[in-house]
Image (spheres, rainbow, N blue to C red):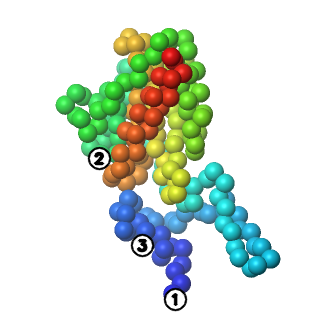
Amino acid sequence: MFKLGLTTFLAIILTLTGWLNLEAAIASPPVLDFLSVKSSSTASVVITMGSKSLFSFSGKRPTNLGVTTGKLAPCPSSPNCVSSQAIESDQEHRVGAIAYKSSATALANLKSVIEGMERTKIIDATDDYLYVEFTSGLMGFVDDVEFYLDQDAGVLQVRSASRLGESDLGVNRKRVEEIRSKFAALEA
């Protein structure tokens, strides 16, 4: 049996998945300060993580987020983003906006849904905007999710994008649909 260092192990994982730039992973391996290791009388070791990710590939928070003249930032060309404001012909990135019944309660209900989901952090909340970071369970990838209360259109506009990598394996689209479903149940 051979031993692998943490950096080598991560390099192999990242090479196989192709999610990140290998050089960046080797240059700055993830911090594992939240792990707790417990020994028992039988000399076995148990590693626990609580509700945090095993690794932390969070990347840098984007600087182009927010609402500008009624629009959220457009999706990049990579397939790891969905937006309700993407043009109709862009089915790779297009997702439906979220309908609401009352603009007075829409963001409060949306916050309630978000707060009930795992590994979320609300970064910014105003009267018509909500910005949330979602972190994946194992690798700690961060997705930036924005909601804009578009009172002119009578919907919540949404944009969900991965910070790192090329593909998200459909995670952003699935998340938006999960939020839509939970939100609709609250609005019923």
The number of callouts visible is: 3
Of the residues tagged 2 and 1, which is closer to the observer? 1
Q: Are marks 2 and 1 in contact (CB under 8 Å)?
A: no
Q: Residues within 10 Å of mark 3 (few under 14, many from 20)?
A: some
| Element on which disc 3 rests | helix
Residue at (49% x, 48% y) in the render: 142
Which of the labelled discs sits on residue 32, or is there none? none
Label located before the other in sequence (2 or 1): 1
Whole-angstrom CA distance, mark 2 to mark 1, is 40 Å
| Element on which disc 1 rests | loop
Left or right, 187 with respect to 96, comes to right
Residue at (46% x, 44% y) in the render: 143
Q: Amino acid at mark 3?
A: Ile
Whole-angstrom CA distance, mark 3 to mark 1, is 17 Å
Q: Residues within 10 Å of mark 2 (few under 14, many from 20)?
A: some
| Element on which disc 2 rests | loop
Q: Is residue 58 something one can see in this rendering? A: no
On screen, residue 74 above or below 27: above
Of the residues tagged 3 and 1, which is closer to the observer? 1
On screen, residue 153 above or below 72: above
Q: Are marks 3 and 1 in contact (CB under 8 Å)?
A: no
Give the residue number, with chain letter if any, for mark 3. Answer: 12
Whole-angstrom CA distance, mark 2 to mark 3, is 23 Å
Q: Residue furthest left?
A: 89
Q: Amino acid at mark 2?
A: Ser
Give the residue number, with chain letter if any, for mark 1. Answer: 1
Label located before the other in sequence (2 or 3): 3
Residue at (51% x, 87% y) in the render: 2
Q: Residues within 10 Å of mark 1 (few under 14, many from 20)?
A: few
Q: Could you tell me residue 156's position as x and y percent?
A: 43, 21
